Image: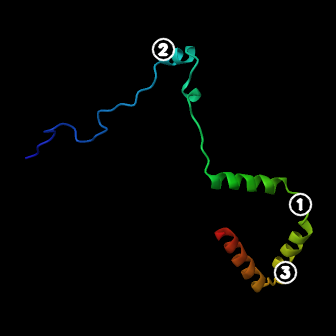
Amino acid sequence: MVIRNIVGDQHPYANQKIGRKEPKEVQRTQENGKSSGESADSVVLSSEARLRGAALQSAKDAPDVRREKVDELKRQVKDGTYRPDMKKAAANLIRDDLDFLV
């Protein structure tokens, strides 16, 4: 024995239909001078997003004065002769972390 739909359809979205605006409704909206895109939409960026945007813009605006150094490092990596100073790298990482905490 199978009993179905005692209370009705159990799916909460089953009776909802996605409606499209009829052409008359679209026309009325345009005549009023406001469309859905002209409502009070706004974008709020976090301080981190603003900082990243500023950093990206600074990087784009910076002159490319270290091209020779970059090319030399690329050549060393390609040749297998690149030997980074691990103590200096570790000190820079620690310095950056301490600056971040302050």
- SS of the residue under disc 1: loop
Q: Residues within 10 Å of mark 3 (few under 14, many from 20)?
A: few
Question: Where is mark 3, residue-wise?
Answer: 79
- The correct choice, above or below, for 55 with respect to 14 in the image is below
Label 1 is placed on what type of residue? Asp
Is 94 placed left or right of 72 in the picture?
left
Mark 2 → mark 1, Cα distance in angstroms: 57 Å
Question: Where is mark 2, residue-wise?
Answer: 24
Question: Where is mark 1, residue-wise?
Answer: 64
Q: Nearer the viewer, mark 3 or mark 2?
A: 2
Is 90 placed left or right of 12 in the picture?
right
Q: Residue furthest left?
A: 1
Sequence-first disc among 1 and 3: 1
Q: Residues within 10 Å of mark 1 (few under 14, many from 20)?
A: few
Is 62 placed left or right of 40 in the picture?
right
The reply to whether discs 1 and 3 touch (Cβ–Cβ < 8 Å) is no
What residue appears at the point 35 percent right and 31 percent down from the top-left corner? 17
Label 2 is placed on what type of residue? Lys
Mark 3 → mark 2, Cα distance in angstroms: 70 Å
